Amino acid sequence: MVTVVRHPVAQHALTMLRNKLTPPHQFRTSSNQLLIALMHEATRSLPTHAETVPTEKESVVGHVLSKPLVFLAIARHGLGLAHRMVEFFPDLLVGTISVEPTTNGQPADARLHLPNAPALGDARVIVFDPIVASGASASRAVGLVRRVGAKDVSLVSFVVSESGLEMVQSRAPELQVWTAAIDAKLDTRRGPVPGVGDFAARMFG
């Protein structure tokens, strides 16, 4: 249920993200490149149906997507990259999931922000968390979309820690996960090790 994408472009982009000397503009470019590579792999199994269309000379039978595609970015980290996805994926619907701390000591509350959403049970839903550290945010986000009806759910992440992956899988064993790397170590403050550093700070300069 976990796929580490070894495509050369994906691994090149990941290396740029890991390199602490990569400047902010290149970090953003490499983030976009890596997300596109992961998304292409995560959507490879999308269903299509035949459709006849006119060309300049005659009609031809082609194939179009049969299922809506919904991209849900966790917090501002992922939202900063979401706008580029609409250029590559037909009729992509983009929303966010915020994971907000509560004031009563209870676990953080996940909230879905997706205006004009289709019935999620009919869609392929991609939850995007750039870096999965402890796995808590990703688990809550996936649990939320499943509770509101999504059945076909995948998690896309640049880097996941082993322990974070274990948490996500323990709560959603059937979840498809697409990533560029699984890091064995986890620093509770800095995230996966070697990781990519402070993703938000590097992303927004």
Image (cartoon, rainbow, N blue to C red):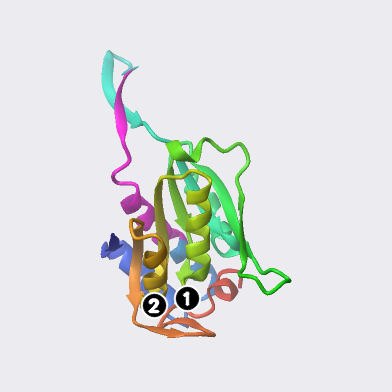
Residue furthest toward the right? 103
In this picture, residue 204 sits left or right of residue 162: right
The image shows residue 137 at horizontal and vertical percentages of 53, 67
- Rendered position, 24 above or below 5: below
Question: In the rendered structure, does residue 165 fall within the stretch colored magenta?
Answer: no
Question: Is 124 or 20 nearer to us in this picture?
Answer: 124
**Which residue position holds label 1?**
134
Image point 51% across, 85% down: which residue?
188
Q: CA distance from mark 1 to mark 2?
A: 6 Å
Instruction: Point out the stretch of residues depicted in magenta.
Output: 32-52
Q: Amino acid at mark 1?
A: Ser
The image shows residue 63 at horizontal and vertical percentages of 30, 28
> How many numbered marks, from 0 up?
2
Image point 34% across, 82% down: which residue?
184
Question: Is 22 or 37 nearer to us in this picture?
Answer: 37
- Rendered position, 43 above or below 128: above
Identify the image quadrant of the N terminus.
bottom left
Question: In the rendered structure, does residue 39 fall within the stretch colored magenta?
Answer: yes
Lower position in the chain sequence, tag 1 or tag 2 = 1
Find out whether the residues at labels 1 and 2 contact each other: C-beta distance under 8 Å. Answer: yes
**Which residue position holds label 2?**
163
Q: Residues within 10 Å of mark 1 (few under 14, many from 20)?
A: many
Residue furthest toward the top? 58
